[in-house]
Structures are given as C-alpha cells and as structure tokens.
Image (spheres, grey):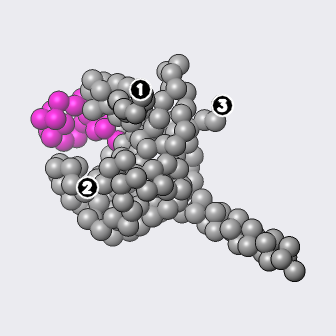
Amino acid sequence: MTKFTLYYPITNFYFSQRFGQNLNPLYKKLKMEGHNGDDLACVSGVNTRSAQEGWVKYCGWAGDAGWRIDIMSNDTFEYKGKQVYFSTVYMHNLPDFPVKVGQKVKTGDIIAHAGSTGASTGPHCHISLIPYEKIGNVYTKLEPDNGYSGCIDPAPYWTGKTAYEVAGLYAKIQELQNKVALYFKK
C-alpha cells in the first residue's frame, strides 16, 4: 500500500504557525482547540503548487479562510485502520485561481497564489489536511468533531521536498518521453 505524502506547496518560506498552536482568539470563536493547519509565511503572490495529486473539489471565497481551494486525492490511503481520501485545503489565497472545480491536478501544478485574504495577519500559504470517507458519491469528513474542524496534523506527511521539485521532475520525464517518441518515429 502506498503511504500518503505531502510536498511543500511553496518555496522560500518559514513556518509561522503549526497545527495545534493556539495563538489567536478566533479559534475559540470557531469552536476549535487550536490552529487547524500549517502556515507557511511567504511573499504575497508566490505560486502555490498542489502538494498532492488529485482534483479540485472546491475553489472560491470561504469567509475567514479567504479565497480557498481544496484538492481531493484520487486514491485512498490507510488512516486509523480505514481507507480514506485526503483533501489538502489551501487558504488566504489571492482570487486569481488558474484552475477550476473538477479539474485534475498533478503534484507541483500551480493551483493558486499565496495572499492574505480573510482573517489573516500577513501573506502566507495555510494548508490543512482532512481525511474523508466516501460512501456512494458523498465525501464525509472522518473526524468532523475533533476540535480542528475535521483537520489533522499534516506534519507526519511532509516529505521535506517542495512541489516545485516534483514539477521539475515531471518536466524532465516529459522531455525524455518526447525524445524517445521522436527516436522511434525515425
């Protein structure tokens, strides 16, 4: 079975707030125990790349989350003894999404541009991770009442590599495939 992994969606960042930290009174208002994701502080407008392969589940305004995009995994992965789909949620983006709902994305595809929209104190890429069960055609949060709006700590899933690096590998593979195809056309 394949292990679920995440790639950092931006380059040149630092963690300004990690999952579970409770530095903002907004969390109590939202009935959360603490921060429901990782904040990657960066310059406004930088490319945000998909941290996983999947499809665009949601793309639009989401109140305190600002401009938000959700990417749902194509495959299932084991989590707490169940087969689940994982959704990566990117918040506080600028409103110029280069993708649309239903579109398939690869790890490293540009899906947004980091910003400071909604309830945000500065430009960053907020990323949350949510496990979902799928019953029929309906996706349901596995742990909706866990104190973090169904989100889980993404830290164990980070690979330490960026999605930008993965996109570069995809480009090199495509280039090699093109060369092989040209060779066999001769």
Determine the main secondary structure of the stretch shown in magenta.
loop
**Residue 84 on image: x %, y %:** 48, 30
Q: CA distance from mark 2 to mark 3?
A: 33 Å
Q: Residue 27 occupies which quadrant of the picture?
A: top left
Assess whether mark 1 and mark 3 are in contact (beta carbons under 8 angstroms): no
Assess whether mark 2 and mark 1 are in contact (beta carbons under 8 angstroms): no
Q: CA distance from mark 1 to mark 2?
A: 25 Å
Q: Is residue 142 left or right of residue 85?
A: left
Assign a secondary structure to mark 2: strand
Please give the name of the residue rendered at 40% of the width and 52% of the height, measured from the top-left corner: 102
Assign a secondary structure to mark 1: strand
Magenta part of the protein: which range?
20-37
According to the image, label 2 marks what residue? 60
According to the image, label 3 marks what residue? 1
Q: Is residue 122 above or below residue 2?
A: below
Q: Earlier in the sequence, mark 2 or mark 3?
A: 3
Kind of residue sitting beneath label 3: Met
